[in-house]
Amino acid sequence: MKRIGLSVNGSPHELEVEPRELLVYVLRERLGMTGTHVGCDTSSCGACTVLVDGESVKSCTMLGVQAEGRSITTIEGLASNGELHPVQQAFHEQHGLQCGFCTPGFVLATVSLLEENSSPTEDQIREGLEGNLCRCTGYHNIVRAVQAAAGKELPA
């Protein structure tokens, strides 16, 4: 076991983890952040995406011990004072979700994408989110949600 300290959604945590324990399981099972979903365990789907020091990371590809001293943001940490984050609001308004399983990963990947490029083209959005998979929506409304969050004029 290794003792680590990290910040999750602005709150400090200290805990002991197995050296081989994946961050996704530390977040879900140790810290109760169940919005971080385990989809494929192969880093193919992106359902486990979180922000690590502001960067989009698939938490099934990172060990908990690698999070030592880092700041993690999960989907539970985006809303503030009962108000949805603008990306969450855009996904809601543009119907960028169906079953919702992939949505937390898409939302966090979008936050990271818009931090890097505040006005992406449709092609840049699709490329920026290519590591996240949705089996329900066909991506059209997800792209519209990202465009809305970026303040772009939406096609009719």
Image (tube, helix red, strand yellow):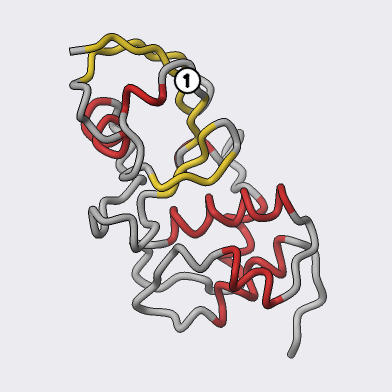
* Nearer to the camera, 118 or 94: 118
The x and y percentages for residue 141 are 56, 78
Lateral position of residue 13 relative to residue 2, left or right: right
Pointer 1 residue: 7
Q: Label 1 amino acid? A: Ser
Q: How many marks?
A: 1
* Nearer to the camera, 97 or 4: 4
The x and y percentages for residue 96 are 52, 71
* Nearer to the camera, 121 or 91: 121
Lateral position of residue 153 relative to residue 95, left or right: right
Which residue is found at the position 52% from the left and 40% from the top? Answer: 51
Q: Is residue 14 above or below residue 54?
A: above
The C terminus sits in image quarter: bottom right
Lateral position of residue 31 relative to residue 79, left or right: left
Q: Is residue 93 above or below residue 70?
A: below
Badge 1 element = strand
Sort mark 1 into few (<14), some (14-19) or many (20+) by Cα contacts within 10 Å.
Answer: some
The x and y percentages for residue 67 are 41, 25
Give the quarter of the image for residue 29: top left
Which residue is found at the position 31% from the left and 32% from the top? Answer: 63
Which residue is found at the position 30% from the left and 26% from the top? Answer: 31
Give the quarter of the image for residue 80: top right
* Nearer to the camera, 32 or 113: 113
Which residue is found at the position 63% from the left and 63% from the top? Answer: 90
